[in-house]
Amino acid sequence: MTGPFGATSTTDDVLAGVTLTGKRILVTGVSAGLGVETARVLAAHGATVVGAARDLDKAKAATEVVRAQAAQGGSLELVALDLANLASVRACADGLVAAGKSFDLVIANAGVMACPKSFTADGFETQFGTNHLGHFVLVNRIAKLFAPGSRLVNLASSGHRFSDVNLDDPNFEHTAYTEFGAYGRSKTANVLFAVEFDRRHKAGGVRATAVHPGGIQTELGRHMTPEVTQAMIESINVANSAGGAPAFAWKTIPQGAATSVWAGVVAAADAVGGRYCEDCHVAEIVDGEGLRGGVRPYALDAENAKALWAKSEEMVAEAF
């Protein structure tokens, strides 16, 4: 069953009647919010979940609910991963490869949002370096572990509409930095990475997609003041009103994680492969300003995706 699901569907709705016993799934960012809920519902349906997090003590405490609800052979294993440090990313990937166990699904969930200008351990602008480059290296280093029929789900955002990637100045050395401009670049990169990974791997039966979880109140928004949040909601409502869409409404965490689970487990692979999904459906391509629904054309552009891949390899000094 692939629906009918929508904006208010929860993870439990999406996986009702689905058994994941025997499936092995990697989820990054399992120390809070969407990552914990994603791991919970997957383990509750029998999956073996490998949860990656920067702070393992925090993740262990946060995922008590995952272990408590694991059923039908479901389980959770935690591994260390700091996406803002490529030495940590490579160590995590090397450990997974050494273990030699394949994955049926990888959900690249972890990320940062709208933080002040700063840089990763490797000198990359923090949002692009963490949200995109960290996952780019991790996923490509473990690509051999993707089982036939498996999927990659990248968590993107409607925030991709803030900005296309800037491959001439990814670290804002010559461009004025804005928190949301940088966030937009990183989220567009998440979509483009899925597009190119899908193109490279679909002949081998491995597909990739990107998803927008919706607006959820989690730790991701810790850098946003109430005033900034309210201004953004008002901006969204203006765009939604102009497009005939309903007013903005916060999603619960189970509603926010539903699209990741739907795209990774329930939806048809050919329907979501190389696409961008929201509210448990494949999004339409929509141009124009504003943080409304749909995906900007530049985020699905195949040549843009290839160029980002090449630039990413150059930046991390590693070819895949």
Image (tube, helix red, strand yellow):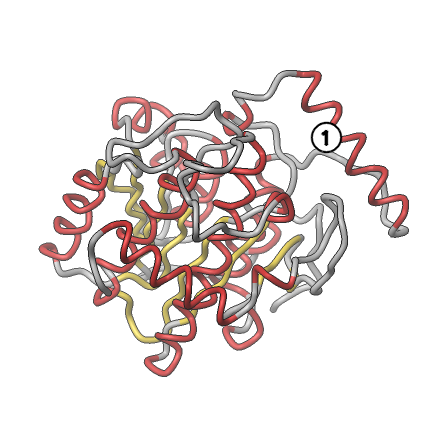
Outermost residue to the top:
226
The answer to which quarter of the image holds residue 249 is: top right
Outermost residue to the bottom:
203
Query: Number of marks in the image?
Result: 1
Q: In the image shown, does 62 or 279 lie closer to the viewer? A: 279
**At which x and y percent is residue 286?**
73, 60
Seen at 62% across and 16% down, the residue is 225
Q: Residues within 10 Å of mark 1 (few under 14, many from 20)?
A: some
Query: Helix or strand or loop: what does disc 1 sit on?
Result: helix
230 left or right, relative to 295: right
**At which x and y percent is residue 173?**
41, 36
Residue identifier under label 1: 232
The C terminus: image quadrant: bottom left
Outermost residue to the front:
174
Q: In the image shown, does 243 or 169 lie closer to the viewer? A: 169
Seen at 41% across and 52% down, the residue is 107
95 left or right, relative to 16: left
**At which x and y percent is residue 116?**
48, 23
Outermost residue to the left:
98
Seen at 42% across and 42% down, the residue is 128
Work out whether 269 lies above or below 219: below
Mark 1: amino acid: Met
Seen at 25% across and 28% down, the residue is 56
133 left or right, relative to 211: left
The N terminus: image quadrant: bottom right
